[in-house]
Each structure stands twice: as structure tokens, then as C-alpha cells.
Amino acid sequence: MKQFPAGFTWGAATAAYQIEGGWSQDGRGPSIWDAFTHTPGKTNEGQTADTACDHYNRMEEDVALMKAMGLKSYRFSFAWSRLLPTGRDTVNEEGVAFYNRLIDALLANGITPWVTLYHWDLPLALQMETDGLLNPEVADQFARYAEVCFERFGDRVKHWITLNEPWCSAVLGHGIGYFAPGRVSQSEPYIAAHNLIRAHGKIVDVYRRKFQSWQKGVIGITNNCDWREPKTDSAADQAAAQRSMEFFLGWFADPIYRGDYPAVMREMVGDRLPHFSAEDMALIRGSSDFFGLNFYGGMYASEPPAGQAVTTIKPTGNGGMAADQRVELSDDPKWEKTDMDWNVVPDFCRKMLGWVDKRYGHPPIYITENGCALPGERDVTVAVNDTRRIDFVERYLTACHAAINTDGVDLRGYFLWSLMDNFEWALGFSKRFGLHHVDFTTGQRTPKQSAAWYGGVMARNGLE
Ligand code: PNW
């Protein structure tokens, strides 16, 4: 029996664009993801999330699924353009009503809501009119949107995540064009990232100044990072692995926990890396009540052979902004892989938690996503027997347990990605991460074996 600490948070996660559908229903405005998926050639088979899981129209049924599996906490995101269709000014009351119904249904069923304010779906109007994340003004637009959310929902929502994986918005959205808004640049990722970090600081400032003392919630940011294991124990490979971690996670977490970008980034990115004003930094430093971490896998890192250019590897291998880091990434042929082609490396999860614990001064950490896509799950009869998913999660939770009990890491919670199969961004419906199978033609949901298994883990607060 591997028991987790009393009060450990157990949950499952989703994101608005990936499940809601109802893309033009009840006054929702378009987002950059609607524009991106409606552009030919951007997603698997041209798929869009216009309908997705149709969660917008099946919300009550989905809360019933959560209840049936014994879910304790549910992490989901608000679609900014459902609440403020043009990103600014007018509030769409029908959007407010939808999230009110969802939050009330969760609470009525004893499920704690964890809300992500921004999971990549910037209102399209902000992209078209003001250049989205590239315009410094976006930080104030974020803060005004967040204020509406705290005002309308903060009486019942006590756990807030400002941004999901800003690394993806920066690198995949503005560096290699794999995600919306589909821009390709060597400098824009650093500008987009900078404005997102500034936005995070301003959102938290609004919450702390106007709401936190009476609403009594917590607020933090979620970053993603894959582990980088030195390929050999040579000093050069160890330095390459460390550098790669600083370019991936340090980029976003260092400003918040240490007051600036990592020195190695300043050195290697030069003029393309913006500077924080004293005023912005005053809001950014210390602006997270907890450390949200999405963890999926890892690779070997090594020093590239002298004189050889480093090329970006597959986007889902997280090789973005490779030229700036000079780190060569590789796989071990022995590693098992998920359907995303991501390596199954539970030991790296423990190392990752230890790295965060040490570099950022022992913060409370929540794994806000971990999970796997498995092949063949389009077929519901295959999907329901997902013993590989159970095995995957069990191994990662074993690593988490060791991080807590042996290494003294302050890990406070774990959210499985995902509650149900959904729209996997550029990969469309081809990758299935769900605890529930979704038939995207009929909308039918079917629990996989992992849903019942995970229900048991949550009920026992640990592994058998
Ligand atoms: C996360 N990559 O992101 C997201 O937060 C989820 O929305 C997503 O469904 C989940 O992981 C599974 O992919 C990532 O291509 C998506 O490097 C793609 C990449 C990284 C993170």
C-alpha cells in the first residue's frame, strides 16, 4: 500500500477548446484556435473542435460521469471568448450562465473546481486588432478578463490557474507555427512569453488586491516541462541537460521564483530576450501560491558535436527553439512510447519533481496534468480494456510517492489528463488520452477500465 499524504488533491483535467464545442453558440466569440483549425492544412485531416465532445450541451451528463467514477477535483478552463466575445468590454451573460451551471453542478456533487483562466484560446479579436500576445497591452486585457472571472465565480471557485503551459503558446504558437496563431519566428516566442509572464503577474495582482482576502482562494501558474537526462556523465552533457531545463522551465518559472530569466538564456538569446521593468517585476516575483506542473515525458540531452547545427526535432518531442540552446536531444531505443511518441519514463518524473523542489525553494507542487494517449482506442471495445493506461499511471504515481516520501518533495496533488477523449490540438481526434472513451460521431461516452481504477486510487488515497 502506497498511501499519499492526508488532504492530497486527486483530480482529472480538460480544457475548454478541447471539449466544449458549441463554438458559435449563445454568443461565444471566435478564438485564435477557431481561426487556426478552420485554415486548411493546420490540423490532422482538417479537423476542428466546432463540436468536439459537445460538452457545452452535455455538461450535466459529464458531471454525472465524474460523480460515477468518484472524482474529487476537476480542472477545466474557461473560454475567454465565451465570457467576453471580443476579449474586452461586453460580458456575454449566456457564457457566465454556462460556467455558473457547471460550477454549481460540481459543487452539488462534492467535486472541487480548479479553473484555468487561459488554455491557449485567445479571443480572435485581440489577435486581429492588437496582435495578440505580441502586444504588451495584452497583459492588461488578461487582467481585466480575470477580474470578471473573480467577480462572477470567485465566491465558489477557490483554486485558480492563470495560464496553462505558456511555453506552448510561445514556442509552438509563435516559434514553429504548429499551434495557433501559427507564427514562425526566432524572436516572437520570447516576446509572447514575456507578455504572458507579465499577464500572469497582473492577474495575480488583481486577485491579491481585490479578492483573495475575502474569497480565500489560491492562485498559481501551470508550466510544462519534460525531463532532460544527461546522455553521458560527461560535464558537457550534464551542462547541456541543465541548460535545456532552464530554457524549458526556467524561462517561465525563474522570473516568478528568482526574479529574472535564467542567466544562460540572457547569454545565448541576447537582444531577443526582453527585460522586465521594475514595475512589472514587482508583480511577477512571488506571484504563485503553488507550482503547477504538467509532466509527460523526457529525453536525453547532450552537447552537440562542435560546428554542427542543431535542428528542431519533431514538435511533440518538445524540441522548440533548439537553435538557441545548442542541445541535442535523443531517445533511448529501449524506452516504451505512448501514441504521442512520448517516452514512458516514470523515474524522470521523480527527478523532475526534485529539480523543481531544489531550484525553486521547496514550493508546494501540483501535477496539473499527466497521462497517456494509447493506440487503437478509437475502437471502444479496445479502449475499455486500457490496462496499459492503468499501468502507466500507477508507475508515475509510484514515482510521485517516492518523491514525497523519500525525497521530501511537497507534492500536494495530481490531475490526470484527461477526463475524456478530446480534441488534441493539431493532432485532432487522432490521439486519445481519456478515462472515458468518446464516440465523436454520436457523442456517446463510455468509461474505460482506468476510470474505475482511478476512482479506487482516489477513494483509498493511494495505490494498493
Ligand atoms: C498539454 N507538444 O500540452 C496540454 O495542456 C493539453 O491541452 C494537451 O491535450 C496535453 O498536454 C496532451 O498533449 C501539450 O506538442 C501539447 O510539445 C503538445 C505539446 C506539449 C504539451
Image (spheres, rainbow, N blue to C red):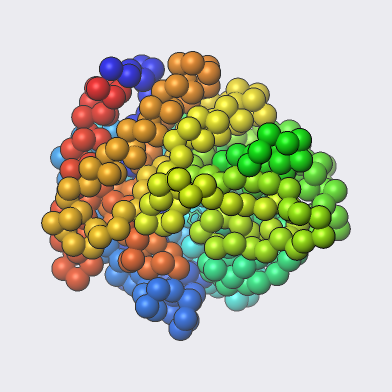
Residue at 56% across, 46% down: 299
List the single residue furthest toward the bottom: 40
Residue at 34% across, 37% down: 393
Residue 303 horizontal/vertical position (percent): 73, 48
* The C terminus - image quarter: top left
Q: Quadrant of residue 426?
A: bottom left
Residue 265 horizontal/vertical position (percent): 78, 48
Residue 228 horizontal/vertical position (percent): 60, 42
Q: Is residue 11 visible?
A: no
Number of numbered markers = 0
- Is 146 left, or right, of 283 in this rendering? left
Q: Is residue 445 above or below residue 49?
A: above
Residue at 76% across, 35% down: 235
Q: Is residue 19 above or below residue 257?
A: below
- Is 132 left, or right, of 224 in this rendering? right
- Is 459 left, or right, of 88 in this rendering? left
